[in-house]
Amino acid sequence: MEAAFTLTIGVLTACGLFLLLRARTFTVVLGLTLLSYAVTLFLLSMGRLVTGRPPVIVEGAQYADPVPQALVLTAIVISFAMTAFAIVLSLRSLGLSGTDHVDGVERP
Amino acid sequence: MLMIALVALPFAGALIVQLCKRGGATAAFAIAAATALAALGVLAMAWPGIEDGTVFKWRHDWLASISLNLTLRLDGLAFTFAVLIAGIGLLVVIYARYYLPRVASTVRFFTLLLLFMGAMLGVVLSGNLLLMLVFWEMTSIVSFLLIGFWSYRSDARKGARMALTVTGAGGLALLAGVLLLGRICGSLELADVLAQGGMVQRHPLYPLMLVLVLIGAFTKSAQFPFFFWLPHAMSAPTPVSAYLHSATMVKAGVFLLARLYPVLDGTPWWFYIVSLCGLVTLLGGAAMALLQRDLKGLLAYSTISHLGLITLLFGLDTELSTVAALFHIINHAVFKASLFMAAGIIDHETGTRDLTKLRGLWRYMPHTGALAIVASLSMAGVPLLNGFLSKEMFFGETLAQDLFGYFNWIVPAAATLAGALSVAYSLRFIYGVFFDGKPDDLPNYPPHEPPRLMKVPVEILVVICLVVGLVPNITVGALLQITAYATLGKAPPEYSLSPWHGFNVPLMMSLISLVAGTLLFYFRREAFHRHHATLALLNARDRFEDLMQALGWAARTLTAALENGSLQRYIALLVAVMVLLPGWYLLGAGTMPLPDAMRALSGPLPQAPLDPITGAGLAIMALGAIVVVACRRQRVAALSMLSMCGLLMALLFARFSAPDLALTQVSVEVVTILLLVLALYFLPGDGDKARQPSRPARWLRDGVLALAGGAFVSAAAFAVMTRPYDSIGDYFVRNSVSGGGGHNIVNVILVDFRGFDTFGEICVLLVAGLGVQAMLKGLRLTAPAFDPNGAPWAGQSHPLLLSILARLMLPLTVLVAVFILLRGHNLPGGGFVAALVTSIALLMQYVASGVLWTESRIGVNYRVMAGAGIVVAGLTGLGSWFFGYPFLTTSFGHFHIPLIGEIELATAMIFDVGVYMTVVGTTLLIVSHLGVRDKRILASTHEQAHASAQTKGGR
């Protein structure tokens, strides 16, 4: 299970990084989103993979570690704000420069 | 107590000078003079104790963890230096009163001078090596300000910068050396360090430590090869030169040699480095002094030469040579200060320091001339003056030393040669300035004597030269004895201070150097001016500036190579660094086949078995990500694959015991995809033929980087997940109900335990929203007339079915949102999720019915709403202050509400409502603004008719 999970994180990271390195703003935003998925899963995995023990208190139960979950919850919301900011930044850049290249000019 | 007063006085004086700025230059002068006088008074009070051999100590622990204590220590050596610093300081203050114009900047001058005095006193009185270093650096910085005092002059700025660079770099070396010394001795207290002489020299780190300390001392005392800054520091006002470059700043280096003499001396390393550097400086400085054209330049190089003499004496292997060095420190300070002052008077009265223009001044200023001549003769080492005494001791010691075996004779020979050169440049000063014809090329003509009081400091110093030279035993005998005792740490050997020792070899050497120097000057007089032209090639300041320019060029070239304006390259570099630096340790695992690598990384925890459904989900997710990459040019397809990955994420959260995260992820995913679709409308497609795909090399680079990054993250995650750990989570589990009044631990952490973090987070969210709004302001985007496939847009912009369903769903969705919000404290849910659900419901109205229709019915300013949310959350936190609890303390209780029943309410829920408002406000702020943009453009294009018809129809 852990191996499969980490491989998935690795694939997400690799895909995200590759898209992040592309020249078009929309592709970069896609990459950013994939990368933030990978980071979120990575953070969650820091609390180890726990099955069927949500951190909601009931009589005499064991719980998954709530700390990474609290971290991830804020991370999800912040990464939404970041994605929104990045996509609007790319729109602004398009409006000012007329191109969707990340550098603001077409490069070979 | 005396010592604290001594160090604190100048700093207090500087403060008072600044406070009494309105009094102008005269008040500043009075305060500065009174301060120096008071310092001298304190020293006079300490004299009886010092004479008896008492060492005054005071210690206060300051930063004991780094051994930086406020320790002051006043012994004979420190006392002598303190007398020089305060005494010559007083004379320089009086002199500066007449030298500088009475303008506002003079107040600044006296402030800096007092600061410098305080720093120097701190250096000599420090009983802790780190504390000494603090003062040492302070002298570097204040001297930078003093040398560059006339900051409108380019040469002053350059000279100051060079002095700071050289002495500052030396200070760093000294810091390293002192820390090493502290490590060797196990203490940075001077008393402990000095007690370990003999042990230090045998330590394996001793050579390194010695070299570092010597670099510090040599840069400060302008020894070869670091001498070049001193001549350019002559662009300072003359009182500064008289103070810094005779008695204080440059003496700090030789003070350090004397201070640490017991722990540094006694090894071949010390003897050869110190004596050879001193010897080279002695000869080189004297020769350069002869070739100077600037009066102060001559004095500067002569200072370098005399400092070389002192250094050489410290380096010789006889104990008496140290006594001679200390004696020469005192004598040099006295005659060189008076010479600088005399040079300043000449400059002041004639308007030039150029030796080719100055001549025949005896006729116009005989009084100044007489004083300058006596001081110069002392510098030349003429009998019956103080300079002669220490020079005789020096000659004697060069004969007594036994360092160079077969070549021992070189040292006395070089000493005699240097003596001859110093006679020659002293004569050049005397003859060239006061005789040699008539002055006909002076900017101020005719020159005349300066104000009476301006000469008083020079007179005092010259009288000291004479008296010490005539009756040394009575005047400085006792002082020298205790200084030598404090320096050596034991009684110095017998020596005799007397102008007359009979006909012996040192006297012969003196006579030879006098005659040879006179002859040299007489026959080569004309040549000096000519040599000056060739010397310009060796101008250290220009070379230094060239070096600085070259450094700047190198920095620019390197920056341009790294930073070529391509963001892609920056990200590639960042990723490469991220992967390479920490990934270095995983490299071993990276070269193995996969199963071996996993075994190598794996920790002791057993892996859970992989069930088929989870495995399928993970595989689909990974495949989805790959498909996003593969069809990134078909943007809608890529986006739908991306959203599939996001939804699978939510399932994974649910699978691995994180229901809150699953809820949040689902709702965030909807909003994100909506936003991206909106943006996609404006962004150009990839169908354009003009767009070139990346080159294969770029592909390869990015592919390698991406794979390496993925492998690194995988390996790190795997290594962590298979190892046990101690979590702070147990604390939250135990205290969630009793301390936070909630059963949903994640929510309690967010709104209670770590509420302040959440508060910060919603602020960030709002800032992002405002940033989005600001970026969209005034933005004009042209909407494409056709979709990426070249087909016209569909005419029906708001499908009927969707708009009716969305309106029906709205109240239900909001009800669900409120439910989620209320139960969030005890069951999965909470402010974030509820807010996102509400946002989706409202956004659906935008999508289904258009912006104008929706906004006219909602009538809420989202920006105000988001801000109000932060206010609510903040006030909830502040509320706990009124009950005497820290910010954001929760209180909770159980309430019975008719029809609903028993519920538990906590103030944290109000906080959660604040979170809810901020998130709803920000989300709608972002998305609806993009929508408005959409709307306006629609209205301005051919779609106008459709849009307005739809709006009317909606109403």
Image: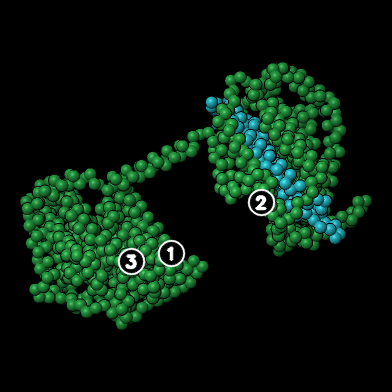
Residue B344: tell me if it is visible. no
Density class for disc 3 (Cα within 10 Å; few <14, some 14-19, many ≥20) is: many
- Residue beneath disc 2: B601
Q: Residue at x 74, y 29 (%)?
A: B851
Would you identify the image quadrant in which residue B283 lies? bottom left
Disc 2 marks which amino acid?
Leu
Nearest-to-viewer mark from 2 and 1: 2
Colour of chain B as rendered? green
Check if mark 1 and mark 3 are on a common chain.
Answer: yes
- Residue B220 lies, in percent from the top left, at 32, 59
- Residue B944 higher or lower than B903, as above or below: above
- Find residue B203 and report its horizontal and vertical position in percent: 40, 68
- The one nearer the camera, B538 or B387, is B538
First reached walking from the N terminus: tag 1 or tag 3: 1
Q: At 65% across and 21% down in the image, what residue appears?
A: B687
Name the chain letter of the residue that bears numbered label 3: B
Given the image, on which type of amino acid does mark 1 rest?
A: Leu
Which residue matches tag 1? B179
Which secondary structure, mark 1?
Answer: helix
Which circle, 1 or 3, is nearer the viewer? 1
Number of the label disc, if any, that sits on residue B806:
none
Give the residue at x 78% y 50%. B608
Q: Nearer the viewer, residue B639 or B53?
A: B639
Left or right? Give the position of B469 relative to B566: left
Q: Position of residue B25 (x, y in %)?
A: 31, 58
Write down the chain letter for disc 2: B
Give how far across and how far down residue B123 sits, in percent: 36, 66
Residue for badge 3: B256
Q: Residue at x 15, y 50 (%)?
A: B355
- Label 1 to label 3, Cα distance in Å? 15 Å
Give amino acid for label 3.
Leu
